[in-house]
Amino acid sequence: MVFRERQQIAICVAAAVIIVVFVLFRYLPLQRRIKTIKGERAAQMLAITKSSAESRRLPALKEELIKLQQAVAIYERRVPGERALGVFLQEIAGLMNEHDLREHLVQPGKEIEAGKLNCIPVNMQCKGKLAQIFGFYKSLQKLDRLARIEQVKLVNDKDFAGEVSMQTKAIIYYRAEAEQG
């Protein structure tokens, strides 16, 4: 009987060792792997959900891109490929005359090179009624050439007769590569 008991104990110990080895080297690693896979799957599902939501926005984004490209094209057309400063200064003087502004002075400043675009600061001065000056600015916006207004200074005359002195600093642009070619 002792032999039989020892045999049963040996079988139980062997079974226990097999169970421990199975749990440590097979079951627990598989459980960790399952947990990792579940985490990866959750991350992938989140990415798919985000992609799906973003793909629904794609037509609106394409439409917005087309509008922005059209706006950029308008601005690019308004930035000439040549300096043409004299033409611009004549247009400004003509607009001032058209709006009956007096004592006008239009002076270009020192040209600034800024990569593909060159900038020319332009100082403008004149006198007239406020409505005439606003008309001048509206006409300035309609010019074919892009001009960015940096600073505007309006000063009433000393006797408040409705006359306003205007001083404006503007910048006009042209493409640098066209000048070099």
Image (cartoon, rainbow, N blue to C red):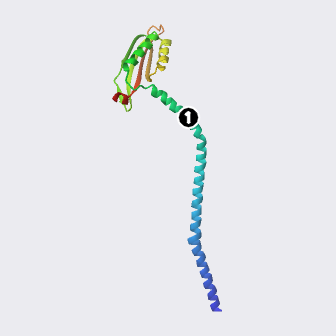
Which corner quadrant of the image does residue 83 belong to?
top left
In depth, the one of 95 and 110 nearer the eye is 95
- Residue 173 in percent (x, y) is at 40, 26
In depth, the one of 8 and 91 nearer the eye is 91
- Residue 169 in percent (x, y) is at 41, 21
Quadrant position of the C terminus in the picture: top left
- Residue 137 in percent (x, y) is at 47, 17
Q: Residues within 10 Å of mark 1 (few under 14, many from 20)?
A: few
Q: Which residue is mark 1?
A: 64
Which corner quadrant of the image does residue 120 belong to?
top left
- Residue 44 in percent (x, y) is at 58, 53
In depth, the one of 170 and 45 nearer the eye is 45
Residue, x 54% and y 33% (percent of image)? 66
Residue, x 59% and y 37% (percent of image)? 60
What kind of element bears circle 1?
Answer: helix
Determine whether 177 is above or below 152 in the image: below
Q: Among all residues in the image, which is located at the extreme front?
A: 181
Quadrant position of the N terminus in the picture: bottom right
Which corner quadrant of the image does residue 35 belong to?
bottom right
Residue, x 59% and y 77% (percent of image)? 18
Which amino acid is tagged 1?
Glu
Determine whether 9 is above or below 169 in the image: below
